[in-house]
Image: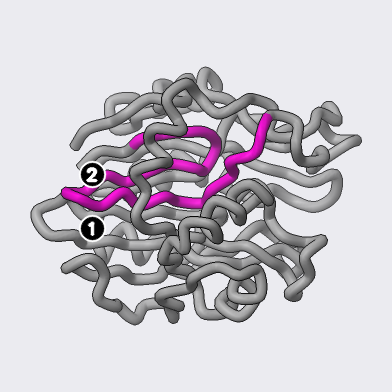
Amino acid sequence: MKLHHLRSATFIIESGPHRILVDPMLGEAGSIPPFAVARFKARRNPTVGLPDGAQAQLDAVTHCLLTHSQTFGLKVLQHQDHLDAEGERFLRQRHTPVVTGAPDQAYLKRLGLNVSQALTPWQPQPFLGGTITAVPAQHGHGWIHRVMANGIGFYLELPGEPSLYISGDTVLTDDVRRALIELKPDIAILAAGQAQMDVGQPLLMAGQELVEFVRLAPGSVVANHMEALNHCPVDRPTLAKMMSEAGLASRVRIPADGQTLAF
């Protein structure tokens, strides 16, 4: 298995003949408005472009996983850092099979996307000769998660490959702990940027939650969702320092944009 990290939460899983795109934010730098204007500098998103070689990787895509896309079915509340206008266009033009959570199915079909599977949490479904299981994700602490898109993570078991858990946008919950402890993924993808809006508590794991996630993970952890959005204050050096101080640096890989990790 290879993981091709593109930017933020967008990456491609390479497994045999399959190239599985996760959460496509594919637009140019600055194509999305700021997600915070008071708590953090009001920079347009994404704050960086796609890396060199991204188009060649995208040209090989065969499938797509979407952790979450919408709140209340309103286009204006679409989570563009996981599915932006260019991501929509890419998937629609190629008629790419999309796997997502059941609550997002109708919304994505209205966008003209080819939703091939809609998952219910903790119910495994066949996928590319193996299985895929949705794990609930809670997008924030406190009241704010009720107005966010509470999507899913994915646990994949593909033939001849290490098992893979993608956390999605979530704080540390009992469901996340269950995925790490019971499913025992060989690789866990951790959304680590500690995103916050101008109001409310963090939307992603922060501080000790990040440390606990890594300690609970039985295998390698790959950290993403950093350094591409104006509301994510945790960058790669900050996370690396945090993990080093916790004695966990050897457990965590923090890819640069455009980097490929082989497992």
- Quarter of the picture containing the C terminus is top left
Q: Quadrant of residue 145?
A: bottom right
| Image disc number at residue 184 | 1
Return the residue found at the far right: 38
On the rendered structure, is 138 left or right of 252? Answer: right
Residue 114, numbered label: none
Q: Secondary structure at mark 2?
A: loop
Name the amino acid, label 1: Lys
> What crowding class fits label 2: few (fewer than 14 Cα within 10 Å), some (14-19), or many (20 or more)?
some
How far across and down, in percent of the image, does residue 236 sit?
51, 23
Q: Which residues are magenta?
A: 4-28
Taking the spot 32% from the left edge, 62% from the top edge, the residue there is 155
Task: Name the chief secondary structure element in magenta.
Answer: strand
N-term mark: 2 or 1: 1
Residue 59 pos. (x, y %): 40, 41
Residue 139 counted in the magenta span: no
